[in-house]
Image: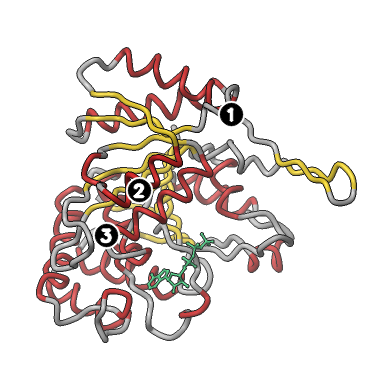
Amino acid sequence: MNYHITLIEGDGIGPEVMGSAVEILDASGVDIRWDKAIVGQEAVDKFGETVPEDTINSIKKTKVALKGPVTTPVGKGFRSANVSLRQKLNLSACIRPVINLPGIVTRYQNVDLVVVRENTEGLYSGLEHQVVEGVVTSLKVISRNACNAIGRFAFDYCRNHGRRKVTAVHKAAVMKKSDGLFLEEIRKIAAKYPFIEYDEVAIDNLSMQLVTDPSQFDLLVMGNLYGDIISDLTSGLVGGLGVVPGANIGKDYAVFEPVHGSAPDIAGKDLANPLAAVLSAVLMLEYLGEHAAGNRIRDAAYKVLEEGKVRTGDLGGKSGTKEFTRAIIESL
Ligand code: ATP
């Protein structure tokens, strides 16, 4: 089978880690024709908008994209391309599987959880308003439909991936209406899946529990801002931002991308760990039904990690992005 897939290389370390993922996909023998598209600053310079129509049209045509990280100006400038893309394509669910890697010793060796994050609303609705000088409001939008959609996605994912428990994450003691509505919807869905264990935890308590005993969690479902933060926190449990993949899934389209950002501090220096990008490509292959190729790539990368000779700096090694990529291809 041959595939036509949109490729967004992104900024900073994006071209390096995406280059690695594409090389490894090529070496795996899966036949992919890439349609290159742009977002972020490059798109603003060329088309005057962060996520241009051409990019949206490309993904609407191919249905699937592999995307690198994109720099977003802090506190000013254009709107986050990541947030816009997820909203424009209604990529309502974001999944980040967080699992220990062979040969990578971290504080805990029993982490195997999935963060499922609502991707289109919450505090990332982008609705900010200056009331008067020195006073601003930022709207947290929670809709019954989106809570229902993310709840269904979470329970279906749990069932389809042989997981046992869903934990809903909230702060409904304070945000009684917004997080209250989220919990109300998730509880309704939980009642329809009696064979899946269900519980709830407040976001502050979850943060403490995760860094003391992450093994108690299986699938965590939460809103947009909580999911963004908890994804980075849980990455830290298994080796850092360089190793955790992600997928944004909607009804019609899917965009696969690493959890990490564009890491401008190490860009262009052959220092970035491409594993998060490579494992995002594996998630993409699984979504496409190419399980054998996905497993081969994951096994090849795991073998290199386990041998321990070739590792990037973030994992305590001395190898560069290119050397690690070559080692995975050889292992393939
Ligand atoms: P964003 O705000 O765009 O979400 P972030 O908060 O995830 O970004 P990053 O830019 O990803 O932040 O990275 C934070 C730090 O983690 C970087 O400065 C870099 O040192 C390290 N880092 C991130 N990704 C990688 C990687 N693939 N390989 C090695 N180090 C990385």
Residue for point 49% across, 39% down = 91
Reading the image, the residue beneath label 1 is 175
Asked whether mark 1 lies closer than 8 Å to ligand 1, one says no
Crowding at label 1, few (<14), some or many (≥20) Cα neighbours within 10 Å?
A: few
Q: Quadrant of ligand 1?
A: bottom left
Three-letter amino acid code of the residue under disc 1: Met
Q: Work out whether 206 lies above or below 111.
A: above
Please tell me the numbered disc located at residue 238. Answer: 3
Splitting the image into 4 quarters, where does residue 200 fall?
top left
Of 273 and 294, nearer the camera is 273
At numbered mark 2, what does the secondary structure look like: helix, strand or loop?
strand
Splitting the image into 4 quarters, where does residue 202 fall?
top left
Residue for point 45% across, 26% down = 149
Horizontal placement of 232 versus 23: left or right?
Answer: right
- Sequence order check, earlier mark of 2 and 3: 2
Reading the image, the residue beneath label 2 is 96
Q: Position of residue 147 (x, y in %)?
A: 49, 26
Q: Nearer the viewer, mark 2 or mark 3?
A: 3
